[in-house]
Amino acid sequence: MSPDSVQSRLILGNIRLGADQQLDDALSVARNRMKITGIPLGALSFRLHRRSVDARHRDRVSLVCSVIVESTQGADLCALSPSVLAAIDAKPLREEPLALQKRGTQPMKYRPMVVGMGPAGLFCALLLAENGYRPILIDRGDAVEDRVRAVERFHTFGILDTDSNIQFGAGGAGTFSDGKLLTRISDPRCAWVLRRLHEFGAPDDILYKAKPHVGTDVLRVVIHRLLSRIEELGGQLHYRTRLDDVRENADGSYSVKTNRGEMVCSALVLALGHSARDTYRMLIEKNFDIIPKPISVGVRIEHLQEDIDRALYGNFAGNHALGPAEYALSDTKGERGVYTFCMCPGGEVVAAASEEGGLVVNGMSHHARDGKNANCAVAVSVRCEDYEPEDGNAALGAIAYQRMIERAAFMAGGGAYAAPIQTVGDFMRDQLRHVPTRVHPTYRGGTQVKMAALSSVFPSYITEHLRYGLSAFDRKIHGFAADDAVLSAAETRTSAPVRILRGDDLCAIGHKAIYPCGEGAGYAGGITSAAVDGLRVAMTMIERFAPSEC
């Protein structure tokens, strides 16, 4: 992208459409606004920038759009006067490209290695590969197709593969999710990530929806293509390859011990994902500086999607242009927050365990989001003070806290990875009298569930805050705490429980060329922010090192 094109783009905002209007109507509104400027419309191009749904008033649900206007004949749109920009409700778009400051010269004797094929590892490896570094990329889990089969075996038969499951394998935990790309970080690299995902097969609408998502079915294709691109550029992919140990050699390189043999690299990226508990322990034992961090734990709640649509859209429920309704809710009681997380319209609750004897639930949607139920996590914040150190280590105590709840859920479900469930009405009244009727659980097809008192799964303060949150959210969305809504436990993998400390150079404290990265290292939350952190690490490496010749 040339500097001129960056300076010649505007965003025209606050274009409101009726729920039945077409998105092309937003472009027509933008063209009419631009007539005020006197610039010939033939010298401009128009494309949709963002589209969101305003459902604050159910009797007048609308679409809110913005449009990018770009000069095609050299006019500097940013030179328009402030009064003209105000009249057309426009502001300059100064989205900077992904630009490296310099190329590094420090020699690499060996290739760089990236541990983990989640979004952080994938985008780190992609940028390295596209700049000639031919990275080695390893993951303890399987390639996409084999991983899908492993997950289906667990779903159908309860046979857990602790190395290849919903948490581990190509694409990371996000592969079996709704594939949400919404992020709270403000970084121009977010747009780069979306464009690349689109290039590898994600749908067009991720480029303009305010709450973009890919869906698990499409995301699997995207990940396969992205990994193929890395391989085409000389990268090496190693599946079923678990990081077991790492040591620094006299020449500054690293010997990486795996379950499939030893490899050597000149720089090591730790994009582990938030569930690599055995790897965390190994790093702690090797004196990496790792601290606990706050997390959230709770339950998955399921409603009928049509009930959520009606509660949020009123008479507009079912409108194709709006799609299935989604929400994000939060509240605070005392020093703890309670909030909804990873809402999956038209989705299902999935079996997300990665350790034997622990029960974990998560949510997943296909791109069409056409399932009968909506689900989301209702999670309560957990503070570092809530952890009891394990083996004298606070970070291990954070992991032990998650594990304690997962094992309690496993026992409450009767073992064999059946999920403990309870109706909301019974949970609120601390009783166990009713089975699901109108809303049926989707975990493992709804057949591998067991009625249980979910208060037995959590510390009492978590149960108290879950009940408070359900009541608070019912005041915001009528029917959220309906008696026949269904809860399942336990949602514990909302984020990494630890942070691997790194310095301003993005290297782990005390390690010259080891780069903790992404959500599992404690520096991101979600697909897009993890991918951006992977890019940040890759850019830092490119600006430091020259590619290896071997």
Image (tube, rainbow, N blue to C red):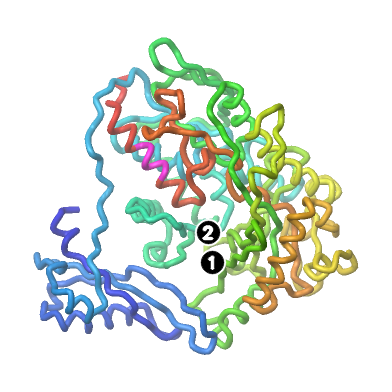
Q: Answer yes or no: do the residues labelled 2 and 1 have beta carbons within 8 Å?
A: yes
Task: Give above or below for 438 relative to 272.
Answer: below
Residue plotted at (75% across, 66% down)? 486
Classed neighbour count for the residue bearing mark 2: other residues with Cα under 10 Å, few (<14), some (14–19), many (≥20): many
Observer-nearest of 38 and 84: 84
Is residue 8 found left or right of 416 in the rendered image? left
Residue plotted at (43% across, 31% down)? 515
**Residue at numbered disc 1:** 368
Quarter of the image for residue 300 reads: bottom right
Task: Give above or below for 456 relative to 437.
Answer: above
Is residue 431 found left or right of 105 in the rendered image? right
Q: Is residue 311 magenta?
A: no
Which amino acid lies under the numbered mark 2 shown in the image of this protein? Gly
| Mark 2, secondary structure of its residue | loop
Asked whether the viewer can see residue 161, the reply is no
Which amino acid lies under the numbered mark 1 shown in the image of this protein? Ala
Question: Which span is picked out in magenta?
Answer: 533-538
**Residue at numbered disc 2:** 215
